[in-house]
Image: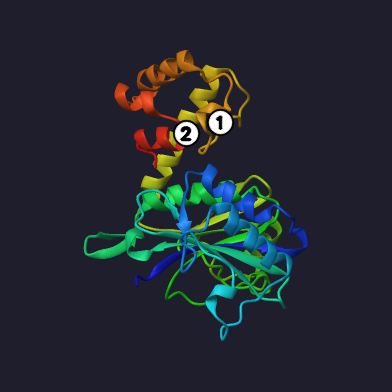
Amino acid sequence: MPAYFSMIFTCKKNMEFEGLIQDFCDSLMNAGFVFQSGYWGYEEDSLSEIVAWNQQKLREDHEPDPKAAYLTGYKQIMFTYGGFSEVRMFVQNYKEDDTFSFHVVLPEDEMILWMKGRPDYDRKKVKRLLAVCERIWQRPYVERIQTELELSDPLSEEEEIRKGAEPGAEPFAILAGELWEMWKENSLYVEKYVCRRIQRDGVIISRRGAQDKELAMNQELQDRIIALIEEILMVPSGTITADTRIEEVEEWDSLMHVTIIGELEEQLGVKIPLEDAIELKSMPELLEKAGCL
């Protein structure tokens, strides 16, 4: 069994609603995740069957008993995404907590590259997963997002973060603005991180690294591409984001698509082969072809 890299989405129980489990799964699938099967005894279950089971368990505030059969707990889901050999999602809940969490896990070694004999994160994969998390952050029931490696220290709880403890940011986390302000005021570790504000009063914090300059250049190119596309389509700033699907933008028809590809090369030097350009369905695909992801 491989070691795992985890993205943990902490959610508020007082915002639980009937379709929450489905909403979270839809958010993953809208970001490119594809349902594959159930897991660990539930391989033949459909997504709707698993969602309904987990929703009922969550409604009951169910806490799995480690001594009981695993078949009585929340059902896990297998997805395919981004070429990873395994992507799995499960729910974790403790009755005494006012939150529960979704865990999305994938093989740790597939997140790592060896640079000059030393391990470092595959920044392209990190950037894609961060885009997924930034999209899911827009769900109002998500309270914070942390990441960890299997042998990381236990994740810090909200009160610990308020007092200055490091959040789980292996390699990034997303905190609510008010929590981030408290952490920044009390933490001794602020200089280890790069921080960026996002919508819904969120703040992405990510570890500084040797590839920060490259990441900054990629972000600058991404911003210029988005701004140019918005200018061509004559839509308001903010209409196009790093995870927009082309079908979502009424102005982005086939003629405008050809124009965009031509102007990207003419104005920014971004060359996307015609056979690739025809197949583009979303901004993540376009940005990847442009070398930003």
Query: Residue beneath label 2, please?
Result: 283
Q: Is residue 196 left or right of residue 16?
A: left
Locate the N terminus by quadrant: bottom left
Whole-percent x and y of residue 98? Answer: 73, 70
| Quadrant containing the C terminus in the rendered view | top left
Coordinates of residue 126 in the picture (x, y in percent): 42, 53
Is residue 196 shown to the viewer in this render? no
Dividing the picture into quadrants, the one containing residue 181 is bottom right
Instruction: Look at mark 1 in the image and give the residue it sits on.
Output: 240
- Residue at the far right: name it: 14
Question: Residue at image x 50%, y 46%?
Answer: 131
Q: Position of residue 272 (x, y in %)?
A: 32, 26
Residue 175 is at least partly visible in this image: yes
Looking at the image, residue 228 lies above or below residue 87? above
- Amino acid type at circle 2 is Met
Report crowding for label 1: few under 14, some 14 to 19, many 20 or more residues within 10 A (C-alpha). Answer: many
Callout 2 secondary element: helix
Q: Residue at x 63, y 62 (%)?
A: 53
Asked if marks 1 and 2 touch (Cβ < 8 Å), the reply is yes
Of residues 159 and 285, the one nearer the viewer is 285
- Which of the pair 233/219 is nearer the observer? 233
Q: The disc labelled 1 sits on which kind of residue?
A: Ile
- Callout 1: SS: loop
Measured as percent of width and height from the top left, residue 237 is found at 61, 28
